Every structure is written in C-alpha cells, then in structure tokens.
Image (tube, rainbow, N blue to C red):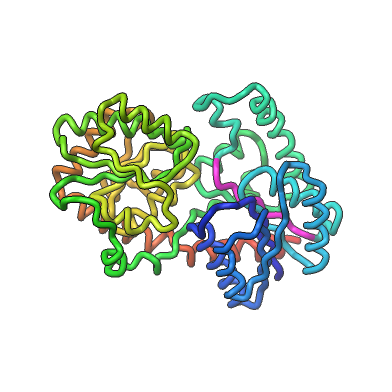
Amino acid sequence: MKILELAMYDADFFSSFGDSLLALGKELKKNGDQMIICFPRKRNWMRVFEQEGFQLEIIPMQKIFDFRAIKVLSNLLKKHRIDIVHTHFGLESQVIGCLAKFFTSHKIKIVWHWRSPLRSDILEREKISVFLRMKFFFGNPLYRGFDKCCVSKHVVISNEIYNILLARKITKQKKIKIIYNGIDIDKYNLKVIEQQTIPLQDINVPLIGNISNFNPPKDHFTFLLAAKLVLKKYSQAKFMLVGDGPTQKEVENYGKKLGINSNLLFMGTQSDVRGFIKACDFTVLSSLHEGFGNVACESLALECPVVATRVGGIPIIVRDNETGFLVPLKDPKAMAERILYLIEHPLERIRLGKNGRKLVKQKFTTRRWAQEMRSVFMDVLGNS
C-alpha cells in the first residue's frame, strides 16, 4: 500500500501535525506500507521525515485550480504508483488531489481530512467580504461534485464537522469517519518538562496562559475582558499570551485601553510551548470555533487544566468539571468566574490536571491516531 500525504502546510516549526504524520509513517512502515509526503515548500524541520526514511516532494500549491501543481502531482502519482491520496488543510489540496486523479488513474483513492469547519459555517461569527461569501456559497456544490466522482472517504476530527458535512449534504453518513487528533505523549514526560519550565515569576503569583496565535477566531478580546475582572480581586495575577498573528497589535492596544497591560506577558511565537504551558497554573482557550483544539491536549498532557469555550471539538477534550471547565462564547464573566475558581482551589487544579493527562494517554495519542488512519486506508482499498 502506497500513500501520498498532500498537505497545504507551511508552518515555521514541526508542531503536532508533524508528529501525527511521523507516527503514521512509522505505522505504515511497520506493516510494509510506504508513505510519500508533499508540502508546498521545503522547511528545515522537514528533515526529520527524511532522517526516518520517508520521501519528501514539493508541490507549490498556491490556488484552488493550480494546473502546474496538478501536473506535478499527476507525475508523482504515476512515478510512485500511489494507491491513496490523503489530503490535509484546505480546498486547494482537496481539489488538486482530485483533479490529479482524473489525469492519472481512476483506481487511485482519495481521502479528504477535514481539520476545521467549512468556512461557510462560520460566516456569522466573522466579518468576511462579499467575494469570499460567494466563494464559500458555491463551494458546497463543488464539494458534492468531487465527493460523488472522486472521494472514497472523509475523515473528520470532531462531531461538529461530522454534523456539518451531513447538514450541508456534502456526503453520506457511511463515507465519514471520525478520528480525533493525537499528540506524541512521549514528548510530554513531566519530569523532563519541569526542568525546561520557563521561570517567569514569583511562584505565589497566579499565572494563566493563553497559547494561540493572534487571529480573529481566537477571540483574545474576551480573554482580556475576563482578565480585567480577575484582576479586581487578584491584582498581581499575570496572563501569558504565546503566539503571534495579524490581530496581535490590536490585542495589545486593547490591553492598554483596559489598563491591564502591565499584567500581560506577550511571549511571541515559540517553536516549543511545553515549558511555557508547564509554567502556568492553568490555561484558557477563548476561541469562537475550533476544529479540535490540540493545545488543550498539550495542556492536559502536562497536567495543566483548561478553561475553554464550548465550541467544535473542545468538549471532547475539556470535559466540564473532569479535565477543566467549559464556558459560553464571548462571556468574559463566566470565564472570569472559572479562572477565579481555579486560582482559589489548587487541589482542584491537581485533580483536573491528573484526569486530563490520563484522558490524553487513553484516547488522544498519535499512536492511536496512526492506527485508526491505517484502518481507514485498508478499508478504502478493500472496498475498491
């Protein structure tokens, strides 16, 4: 069995997605299968795959109907005699993968991996141009057409995305498989990470973390409003924000407007967030929508409980009063109440954190993810 992984993924560092692909490659190799990985451009961190014996190919995917990318992919499919194309991250890779199949062989199977909700389902929560609204509106028929003629299986990372595909009539129930994301639990050795923890402050001062890039869907503004409410009672508390992005300056200015910037720690992008998470008493995720919420998994793997909005796949990981607390969207008061509760109940933080690590080890590892993905591939080929 030969699998080609097609990913519109151009991050600056390895991340949990890289861990997942590496685990999948090892699982396939263990069973005598082969994996070829395609990215839009070469990055230094990709050497890890080559060191493990996996072949990398570069396909510069820049737009949905990128005919140069389609031609390059078609040649690769013939060269490696690929059985399955597994696409990740966006309509570009989905469309390019399907069109390359037309120019190659109808025997090739396509598996679409949905890592976020369809953009048409989040329009109400974001300000989007008329052009993009039209693009998303006409996207549904495009998805349906490719589903009928090309796609053998849809893998989704949460129940929310599963329901969206059915509600939008993109595909049929029997063609969808829910496989939750995973993290490499071996990288979350508590004793090792404790030695790498970032010494940021006096241990007696509460430190609350928000580990997410600065984009509108992350809603840092609600997080800052909650922080202001918390500071009325704990004026020395610190709120650490790790990441960067287009809304960072706006968030910094909002912090100044609220008069709380002296309590905010902007740490920028970090290639390894484990030490930063472990330095926190707990973390907060204020997102308006999430496909899955890998950072919640990372936090819980380090026995760090999470306060998060009840969106997307988050409730699968952050189980209310079991591994953390869930709060409504855009509700700084409810968020502040849960933050205050965790500040004032250190034993509860320990209980929730230990429950969280146990849950991640049982259900959300890359090893489990890779095994389930290989089963999907076997099923797809078995139904040919």
Q: Is residue 41 above or below residue 163?
A: below
Quarter of the N terminus within the rendering:
bottom right
Left/right of residue 234 with respect to residue 135 in the rendered view: left
Where does residue 186 sit, x and y in percent of width and height? 40, 69
Residue 132 is left or right of residue 279, and the answer is right
Q: Position of residue 38 (x, y in %)?
A: 68, 59
Q: Is residue 120 above or below residue 151?
A: above
Name the residue rendered at 66%, 36% in the picture: 169
Q: Residue at x 60, y 52 (%)?
A: 9
Please state which of residues 346 and 238 is positioned toward the viewer in this rendering.
238
**Residue 141 rendering spot, x and y as whole percentages:** 73, 34
Task: For the C terminus, give its image quadrant.
Answer: bottom right
x then y, percent, for residue 54 = 64, 71
In the image, residue 303 lies in the stretch drawn in magenta: no
Give me the residue at 50% from left, 46% from top.
Answer: 158
Q: What stretch of residues is rendered in magenta?
A: 108-116
The answer to if 111 sits in the magenta stretch is: yes
Residue 196 appears left or right of 155: left
Nearest the eye: 241 or 27: 241
> How many marks do you count on the picture?
0
The image quarter containing residue 123 is: top right
Task: Give the image quarter of residue 235.
Answer: top left
- The residue located at (67%, 56%) in the rendering is 6
| Apparent side of residue 143 relative to residue 202 in the rendered image (left or right) | right
Main SS of the magenta part reads strand
- Extreme right residue here? 103
